[in-house]
Image: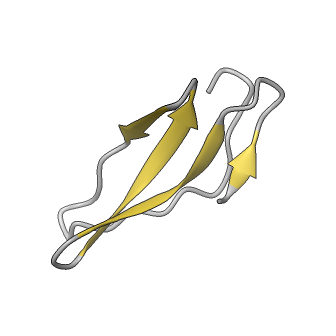
Amino acid sequence: MSDVNEHGHVSGGVYLPPDSFHAARWSGGRVTDLGASPFDRSNPYALNDRG
């Protein structure tokens, strides 16, 4: 987990085998993959109140 906003949305990361790590957002019981760089890695650092 990286951050939680006022609406309960959570930012963090998900591991995707065999060797990828993508930033993600959890909201309302759903996980949204936020994508990654050309090297197939991304890291979330903060989350605003707009999600």
Does residue 44 sit above or below 32 in this rendering? below
Say which of 26 and 38 sits in front: 26
Identify the image quadrant of the N terminus: bottom right
* Figure label count: 0
Does residue 15 sit above or below 37 in this rendering? below
Find the residue positioned furthest to the right.
6
> Left of 45 or right of it: where is 25?
left
Find the residue positioned furthest to the front.
29
> Left of 16 or right of it: where is 12?
right
Could you tell me which residue is drawn at 61 percent across and 27 percent down? 51
Query: Residue 8: x and y, percent?
Result: 75, 31
Could you tell me which residue is drawn at 45 percent across and 47 percent down? 24
Could you tell me which residue is drawn at 71 percent across and 33 percent down? 48
Res. 45 image quadrant: bottom right
Find the residue positioned furthest to the bottom.
19
The colouring scheme, among rainbow, by chain, secondary structure or one colour, is: secondary structure
Does residue 2 sit above or below 31 in this rendering? below
Res. 47 image quadrant: top right
Query: Residue 20: x and y, percent?
Result: 25, 71
Query: Residue 4: x and y, percent?
Result: 75, 43
Query: Residue 37: x and y, percent?
Result: 26, 60
> Left of 48 or right of it: where is 29?
left
